[in-house]
Amino acid sequence: MRRPGLSPLIAVLLLAACTPGPAGSALDGRQPASAPPAAAGPSNAAHAAASAAASPQAFGALVPTSLEIPPGTHAAPFDQPRNLNLPAGFRAQLFASGLTNPRMMAFDDNGVLHVTQTSDGSVVALPDRDGDGVADAVVTVHTGLNRPHGLAFRDGWLYVADTDGVVRLRGTADDLARPQRESVVEGIPSGAGHFTRTLGFGPDGGMYVSVGSSCNVCLERDPRRAAILRYEPDGSGEQIFAKGLRNAVGFTWRPGTDELWATNNGRDYLGDDVPPETLNLVREGDDFGWPRCHAGRIVDPEFGGPGACDGVAAPRAEMQAHAAPLGLAFYPDANDVVVALHGSWNRSVPVPPHLAHILLHPDGNAEVENFATGWQLGISSDTRWGRVAGVVVGPDGSLYVSDDTAGAIYRFSR
């Protein structure tokens, strides 16, 4: 049964999204994470150094901030002024517009932002040669891909995760186009259900690929679904690194450590507020419990039973159910994470698209606060003019965020 009314977090998000004036900045949306701390892993000097380098700091109340839209922008979502709610002191720029379903992003060695256009089957590059915070052009890198999503650079190649495999692309040093394509991994399970595949190279040199479930909740025939896989860079040595992650759309490594962190989208149809979305520290061999257990503590009514949550890895932070966390990045340091939440489709009061900031405390606890809101203008999801998807920190220290609905990339700086 769905719970009536608004959860405190949803009320805060809607207030921040809908209030055009200073009153909208009265709340910062911070909430303590209710998940227990994850078990401590092997200690290492890099982890200790990262933890000691900076303490997590809350950004505090959000203030209305005008989105700077370049003159001559013809993309429909930006034919009128747009306001976002950001922490005080942040600048919001429309870095690029007119894109088709932009999702995950990566910078090349020259500092040029690349992004997958998933529904278009392509990758594009967005050079900013004059450094003004606005892309100078949209350059086609490669087309004809099969729902490309994750991407990463390594040894002169651009690796791209298609829905059924991994390819790598190459071109000449003086041209952003990469016409040469080679298959690296074939036969990644695809078809029904979650089709996006995210890709990244870890500090260990391994290539990691997340594969979502084929369903809302079920027993998978292929154990590689609802999992994060690991390969050697040449595509060999496939193994299941961690399982029980229904849809870990975003993952990255904590700076200065070998810690893999991932978001996860919880199952649907257990009500407005169950189960929570999660941020997870993922270790080799971890089982996060799907489909029998959710968030390390909630027994599934269909696939659970006594002991269903025994041995299940607990999340490090919990977020509003059905908010659909996608990309994430450590920002501004190794104790802070910014997560893009796509917004809900199946909640009685929709969760607005927004960015969350998660403060990771040394004792294993975490706090969640709003970092950016404003892509939904009212309670109804019909008032959404954008939905955030990917997050990456640029070489200039700015935060770049993709919007797969408005077809845009934003640049947040201070």
Image (spheres, grey):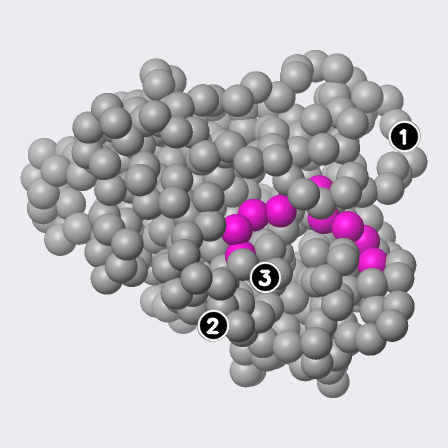
Q: Looking at the picture, does residue 165 appear above or below residue 342?
A: below
Circle on res. 43: 1
- Local crowd size for mark 1, using a 10 Å CA cut-off: few (<14), some (14–19), many (≥20): few
Q: Nearer the viewer, residue 300 or 228?
A: 300
Circle on res. 146: 2
Q: Is residue 353 magenta?
A: no
- Local crowd size for mark 2, using a 10 Å CA cut-off: few (<14), some (14–19), many (≥20): some
Side of 37 relative to 1 (left or right): right
Side of 381 relative to 397 (left or right): left
Three-letter code, disc 3:
Val
First in sequence, mark 3 or 2: give its number: 2
**Mark 3: secondary structure:** loop
**Mark 1: secondary structure:** loop
Q: Nearer the viewer, residue 106 or 249?
A: 249
Q: Position of residue 348 (x, y in %)?
A: 39, 65
Judging by the rendered image, the residue that carries numbered circle 3 is 274
Q: Quadrant of the C terminus?
A: top left
First in sequence, mark 3 or 1: give its number: 1
Q: Main secondary structure of the magenta part?
A: loop
